[in-house]
Image (spheres, grey):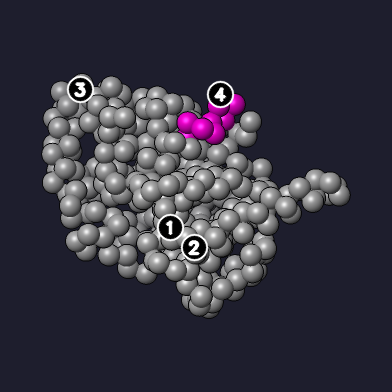
Amino acid sequence: MPEIVCYLPTYSPETEADTAFPRPITRATDQEIASRIDSDKGRKKPWMYLDSIDSILNHRPDIKLVVGDGRSSESIREVMKKHHRESRLEHLEMQWTGGDVPGSYDLELYPEKMSQWIIFNDIFKKYCDEGTKYFIYSSSDVIWQNDWVSEAIKEFEKNPRLQILFPCVKNGDPNLPCQIADGPRDIDSFKAPYQEAAKAPVLNAYVMMFRMDFLRAYAGYPTVFRNCFTESFLSFMCDAVGGEMRIAPRCWAFHYGEGDMWTTPGSAYFYTEEKMIFQDIMNRVQMHRAMNIANVDFYKKILYKKE
C-alpha cells in the first residue's frame, strides 16, 4: 500500500463545463500548466481541476492520488472521466512497454452534493491502511510546481511531535501573511500564529499534510462544519495528542487567489450560516482547555457529526 495518500476535492455547481480556454485531456506538462497559470486563463472548470491533478502526478507519481467529486454537473464529470481514463491508459501502456511509469489516480464520483470533509473521511477510511504514513489534502485550485512533499517528510522525520504541516502558497489570506510567498524559502518551520478572529493558532487549509497517526486518533477530519472554521481547532487537536502543527517555508505550492466570497449568504462556504456554531464550540473549547480537560474524546464529541 502507498506511504502517502492525497485527497483532492472537486465540486462545481455550474450547469455546464466552461468551454473557454480548454486544454487537452491527456497529461499536461509542468510547462504547459505554468503557461496556463501565467496567462490567467487556467481557472475555468473543469480545466483547472485537470491542471491540479496533473501537477501532483508530475511531481509525485508514487502518491496514491484520489479525486473525490461532490456532485459537479454532468458535463464537468464527463471531462473528468475522460481525463481519468487517459491517465489510467498511459499508466498501463508504460507498464507494458517499460521505462518510467507515470502516476495515475482514482476518481470517486459521489452521488450527491456533500461536505468535502465527509468525503475526506470516506477516502481516509477506504485508502489508508497500516502502511500509510501520511495523508495530504490539496484543494482543486492548488498547483504543485515542485516536490514540496520531500521537504515535508524531512520535517516529519526530524520532529516526532509534528502532526500537521502546511506549505506556503502563492496567494492567500492577507490576514495570514506568513503563509503567502512567491516561492519556497530556506527558513525553518515554525508554529502557526495566533489569529484573533479565529481565536486560535491557525493557518488556512489550501493544502496540508497530516501524520496518519493523528487522523487515526480522531478517525478522520472534523465534520461538524461544511467548509469554514475547522482550521481554528486543528492546533488544539494537536495539543490533545501531545503534538503540534507548523508551517514549512521550504514547502510551497501555487494557489489561485481571486477573492472567494466567504460571507455571501448561501455561498458554498457557509461562513455566515455557521458562524454562531463556531462561536459556541470555540467557547466550550476555551473553557475545557482552561480546565485542562480538552482531550481527544472531547474534540471527537463536539467537532464530528454523528454517523
Residue topped by disc 4:
130
Kind of residue at badge 4: Glu
Asked if residue 29 shows in the view, the reply is yes
Q: Position of residue 96 (x, y in %)?
A: 84, 46
Dot 3: element: loop
Earlier residue among tags 3 and 2: 2
Q: Position of residue 152 (x, y in %)?
A: 54, 43
Residue topped by disc 2:
76
Residue at image coords 42%, 30%: 215
**Dot 1, crowdedness within 10 Å: few (<14), some or many (≥20)?**
many
Please report contact status of discs 4 and 2: CB closer than 8 Å, yes or no: no
Earlier residue among tags 4 and 3: 4
As drawn, the label of residue 292 is 3
- State the separation of the CA atoms marked 4 and 2: 35 Å
Camera-side residue: 33 or 146? 33
Please report contact status of discs 1 and 4: CB closer than 8 Å, yes or no: no
Please report contact status of discs 1 and 3: CB closer than 8 Å, yes or no: no
Residue topped by disc 1:
72
Dot 1: element: loop
Q: Quadrant of residue 25?
A: bottom right
